[in-house]
Image (spheres, rainbow, N blue to C red):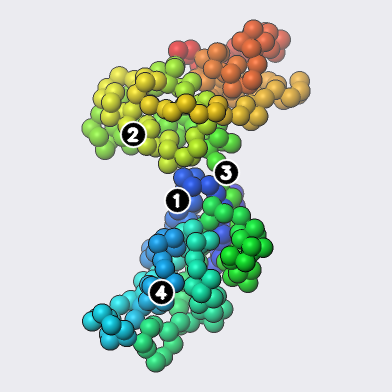
Amino acid sequence: MHRIRLVAATDMSVMIFGENGTGKEHIAHLLHDKSKRAGKPFVAVDCGSLSKELAPSAFFGHVKGAFTGADNAKKGYFHEAEGGTLFLDEVGNLALETQQMLLRAIQERRYRPVGDKADRNFNVRIIAATNEDLEVSVNEKRFRQDLLYRLHDFGITVPPLRDCQEDIMPLAEFFRDMANRELECSVSGFSSEARKALLTHAWPGNVRELRQKVMGAVLQAQEGVVMKEHLELAVTKPTSTVSFALRNDAEDKERILRALKQANGNRSVAAELLGIGRTTLYSKLEEYGLKYKFKQS
C-alpha cells in the first residue's frame, strides 16, 4: 500500500507485475481512485483479445467509411479515457506492430483515428499490468524495450497469495460477508478444519480462486459455519511455511503469535504453519510465557 500511496497522486506511468488472479486490476483501480483523475473515466483494455488488425481502431477509433463495414464513426479507448486512466491489462500479449503504434502515440501524446486526416491530442494516464517477466520478453524480441521504458516509470509487484498467508483469513472473511449479502445467506464463520484448509492450501489461482471457493462454500452452507467439505479444495502441494518458520529466539515470539492469530488460536494449525510439531509449540509457549487469548475451535 505504501508504494500505491506514493505514486497514486502523480501522473507517472505504472507497471503492475503479478500472477494471474492476484488482483492487478484492483490495484489499478486504487491508483486511479487515489489520483487527481478520480471521477474521470477508467478504461480497462484486455490486450490479449486485440489482434494487430483491430488494434488501431480499438485504441484510436475510426471515422465513418474508414474501411469496409465502418458504417458509423467509433471512438477509441484513448478518447473514452480522456482526462482519466487507460489500463492496459496483460500488455505483454500485444503484437509487436501494436506496440510500435502505441509507443509513437505515447511519445507524441497524440493519435489519429483510422481514416481521419488530423491528429488529436490526448490527456490520459497509462497504467499497465502483466503476468510475464517483460525483460525476458525483450530479450526474446517479443516486447519492445523502448515501450517498456515508457510504461514503467514506476513498478508495483503484487505477491501471490501463498506468500501472504496473513491476508488469507481477512480476505476469506471479506468474501464471506460479500457472499452473505449477494446470496442472501447467513453464514457466521469458518469451522476449525475449514480454516486449516484455507491456510494450508497453495492457492494457485490466488485471490480470484479464494473468492470463488468462499462464495461457493457460503452458497452450500447457507447458514451456520463453512465446513471444510463446502470449500471443495483440490489437493495441491501445501503452501510453504517459510513466512512463519521459526528462525531465532529474537523472532520466535512474534512469529508464534502471528501464526496463532492466523489459526484463530488453534494450536495444531499454528504448529503446521510454523513447520514445527505441536509439542514443540507448547514448549515454546511455556518458554516465552505466552497465553494466547483467542478462543480455540
Q: Position of residue 1 (x, y in %)?
A: 56, 47
Looking at the image, which residue sits at the far bottom? 117
Earlier in the chain: of badge 1 and badge 3, it is 1
Q: What is the crowding at mark 2: few (fewer than 14 residues within 10 Å), some, or many (at least 20)?
A: many
Q: Residue at x 38, y 73 (%)?
A: 54
Q: Which mark is residue 215?
A: 2
* The C terminus - image quarter: top left
231 to the left or right of 18 = left
Mark 1 falls on what kind of element? helix
Q: What is the crowding at mark 3: few (fewer than 14 residues within 10 Å), some, or many (at least 20)?
A: some
Q: Amino acid at mark 4?
A: Glu
Q: Nearer the viewer, residue 162 or 136?
A: 136
Q: Which mark is residue 99?
A: none
Mark 4 falls on what kind of element? loop
Look at the picture and state if 193 lies above or below 205.
above
Q: Give the residue pinned by disc 1.
A: 26
Q: Give the residue pinned by disc 3.
A: 159
Is residue 105 visible in the rendered structure shown here? Answer: yes
Q: Residue at x 61, y 61 (%)?
A: 137
276 to the left or right of 52 = right
Q: Amino acid at mark 1?
A: His
Look at the picture and state if 138 lies above or below 254.
below
Earlier in the chain: of badge 3 and badge 2, it is 3
Q: Nearer the viewer, residue 76 or 34?
A: 76
Query: Which of labels 1 and 3 is toward the front?
Result: 3
Q: Position of residue 72 (x, y in %)?
A: 24, 81
Q: Amino acid at mark 3?
A: Pro
Q: Nearer the viewer, residue 216 or 122?
A: 216
